[in-house]
Image: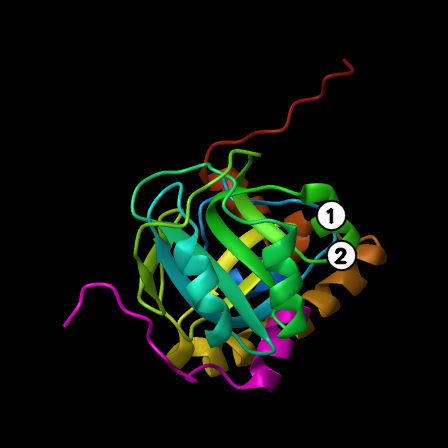
Amino acid sequence: MSRHVVVRTSKGPDPDDLAALARSGVATAHEAAGRTGLVGPELRPIYPGARIAGRAVTVLSHPGDNLMVHACIEQCRAGDVLVIATTSRSTDGMFGELFATQLQARGVLGLVTDAGVRDVAELTAMGFPVWSRAVHAQGTAKAVPGSVNVPVVVAGRLITPGDAVVADDDGVMCVPRADVPAVVAAAAKREANEEAKREQFRSGVLGLDLYDLRPTLERLGVTYVDGDA
């Protein structure tokens, strides 16, 4: 078998679960997953305010070459998130407006890439969200083979095709497909708990008391002194 493959697969999380993860956002989903799943903080959104969750379609490309990004687009469907990794570190601008136009036509929600992106003004005007390692106008070739829908590592995090990818202003995280229902349930429970705490904080309750942290301070040797004397 060739070491360069395009894998056709429809496996992915339930769309209702993905919608729930999008509502929860990265921070809540990360906590609900046992504080796991985060992609490295070097991947940042190109514009603020976007929040998505979708099925991962992965691309493994040679650095400085976007041939396999072209090859992956026909494997994408509505509700997907495209995830691009390179075989070695790259910041070249291997994705831009024309790719985004094709993906939007297929209902793809956005892009997470461990490389660079360009045409940021156009992508922002289109409302196509991208989380990238770099913004860089450096052009790329279309000459070197790679693979589509294989496991990839993006900013230190393993992402497998069909996993759930959640992204917002707080960054990017991945939930393995098998874990999605449990994480969705835990996130809903966490959100309800946080709303109850929020109401108490609004009424003037302090976190020191709600979380019973005063004994912890005492145990750690923290003392109060009067500074006005």
* Residue 14 visible in the shown view: yes
The residue that mark 1 highlights is 122
> Mark 1: which amino acid?
Glu
**Which residue is depicted at the point 66% across and 43% down?**
119
* Residue 35 visible in the shown view: no
Q: How is the structure coloured here? A: rainbow
Check residue 14 for magenta coloring.
yes
Bounds of the magenta segment:
1-24
Regarding mark 2 in the picture, which secondary structure is present there? helix
Q: Is residue 150 left or right of residue 67?
A: left
**Which residue is depicted at the point 46% across and 75% down?**
75
The residue that mark 2 highlights is 126
Residue 200 position within the rendered picture, expressed as x and y whole percent measured from the top left? 78, 61
Residue 81 position within the rendered picture, expressed as x and y whole percent measured from the top left? 54, 66
Q: Is residue 44 left or right of residue 142?
A: right
Q: Quadrant of the C terminus?
A: top right
Regarding mark 1 in the picture, which secondary structure is present there? helix
The residue positioned farthest toward the top in the image shown: 229
Check residue 37 for magenta coloring.
no
The residue positioned farthest toward the front in the image shown: 143
Asked if the residue at tag 1 contacts the one at tag 2, i.e. Cβ–Cβ closer than 8 Å, the answer is: yes
The residue positioned farthest toward the right in the image shown: 203
> Mark 2: which amino acid?
Met
In-front residue for pair 167/67: 67
Depicted 113 relative to depicted 72: above or below: above
State the separation of the CA atoms marked 2 and 1.
6 Å
